[in-house]
Amino acid sequence: MRESHVRRRVGGSYHPEPSELRLSRRQVLVAGGTGIAATALTACAGQTAPLLRPVGAGGPEVEAAERARQVAGATTASFTVNPGLATVDLGGVTVDTWAYDGVVPGPLLTADVGQTLEVTVANSLPDPTSVHWHGLALRNDMDGVPGLTQSPIAARESMTYRFSLAHPGTYWFHPHVGTQLDRGLYAPLIINDPSEPGAYDAEHVIVLDDWLDGTGENPDQVLDRLRSEGMDMGGMGGSPASEELGGDAGDVVYPYYLVNGRIGTAPQIIDALPGQRLRLRLINAGSDTAFRVALGDHHLTVTHTDGFPVQPFTGDAVLIGMGERVDVLVTVGDGVFPLVSLAEGKDGGGLALIRTGAGAAPDPDIRPLELVGRVVTVRDLRATDDVLLPERRPDRTHDLVLEGGMDGYQWTINGRTFDRAEFLQIRAGENVRLRFVNRSMMFHPMHVHGHTFQVRNSDGDGPRKDTVIVRPMETVVADLVADNPGQWLTHCHNIYHGEAGMMTTLSYVL
Ligand code: C2O
Ligand code: CU
């Protein structure tokens, strides 16, 4: 039985070879870890810019930036991670999938800011893979993007990633190969700052996911089906829609939503004491689903997003796009409380329980009122003064126009899919402004590798982030300081949009 997980079924005429994108990506750049070919910038059709030499992923500029991050006497935190085939119990539902160390989410890695992180990835998958350290300002040749910053890790081979940790916060890691992220290959990475213990009694990592692997179609089959069935452009025909997201909520139908690897009928129970202050580190590892998260009978105070601190903002619920992280503080009452991750604009959601005392477990489908209370979004948040990037006149502005292709399942940036992308050239030291201009009817959580940008909201300065939701017909301004030389993938964190072309490269040139 092969149940379709594709939401819409509208004729399309675009039938690419399954290997088309992958093949094209290989053509874009010559992998090798030490550098990329100068032809990369000129090979793109229509490229008229003067010949500028791209900074190589492992070039001297990258080495110098890494040296500047290194702390004298830094110690090393070492781990091994094994991506491989796994049979996983989601709580009464058993699925065959791909996972790190056989568990979903994968193993929690923790280290201290200033330490060197060293992770050996031993690939037991049948396919090549890589690991991307989402959100970290790290050395470019450790960024985990095959074809751009490294060669893929072949089946039965291994690779050791090693880099210094510049910033504390809530991060995560996942492959950057095809649709592997929409299997079970994701895990949290928490970087602590020992000099800043934080005003809370206990912390918990909460990883959210939309799940379909092992339930009929795997993510590659879903992508193939999206391509062969095309898409409708208007978000019509009874598509689920979300007010918070300003339109379409996704392309894919998921049978399950997980919180820390569990379905709602068998939730994880987090024990705490009444009156304790908890820090919850929420991570959206989903591929096509934004989540609206609330804890029944509680307010949430947002303190960080994408690792960086914000001026504390209290609301009832919080919206988290794919790839985003939000840290909240909550002072827990006495009883058993549902932590619900509503699949925004879709049917369903995930559940975990916070238990501080006696009480019946709530119904798995419980929808606490907080979900429809004050929902905190990026527009409510502002960076704390110590991390705020002061507004300077940009030395360079790049627009990224986000559109759905006119022909079949394609998503484009500036009218091009990734295989034909014109790289966004910048130079080290510049103040760079990126303007994400959404001209489609769906939201796109746009992610920039290797940098944390300053969001400028219409009403002023927003938070520092590495992934930001851009709603339909909205423009989001993201300013960054070009202080981390290399070739940095910039893309929609909807994995199906990314694979259907919505990727480009922020390319440091000399
Ligand atoms: Cu989680 Cu290219 O990203
Ligand atoms: Cu998208």
Image (spheres, rainbow, N blue to C red):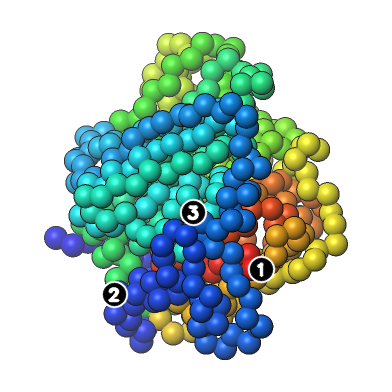
Dot 1 surroundings within 10 Å: few (below 14), some, or many (20 or more)? Answer: some
The residue tagged 2 is: 18
- Does residue 150 appear in this view? yes
Give the amino acid type for the residue marked by disc 1 in the picture.
Leu
- For the image shown, how many numbered marks are present on the structure? 3
State the mark number for residue 169.
Answer: none
The residue tagged 1 is: 510
Q: Quadrant of the N terminus?
A: bottom left
Would the CB of label 1 be found within 8 Å of ligand 1? no
Q: Quadrant of the C terminus?
A: bottom right
Q: Nearer the viewer, mark 1 or mark 2?
A: 1
Instruction: Please report the residue visible at 57 percent of the width from the left and 88 percent of the height from the top.
Output: 46
Q: Nearer the viewer, mark 3 or mark 2?
A: 3
Label 2 sits on a secondary structure element that is: loop
Q: Nearer the viewer, mark 3 or mark 1?
A: 1
What whole-number distance in Å separates the C-alpha atoms at marks 3 and 2?
28 Å
The residue tagged 3 is: 141
Q: Earlier in the sequence, mark 3 or mark 1?
A: 3
Q: Earlier in the sequence, mark 3 or mark 2?
A: 2
Dot 2 surroundings within 10 Å: few (below 14), some, or many (20 or more)? Answer: few
Q: Nearer the viewer, residue 454 or 223?
A: 454
Residue 382 lies in what quarter of the image?
Answer: top right
Q: Is residue 90 left or right of residue 74?
A: left
Would the CB of label 3 be found within 8 Å of ligand 1? no
Q: Nearer the viewer, residue 235 or 321?
A: 321
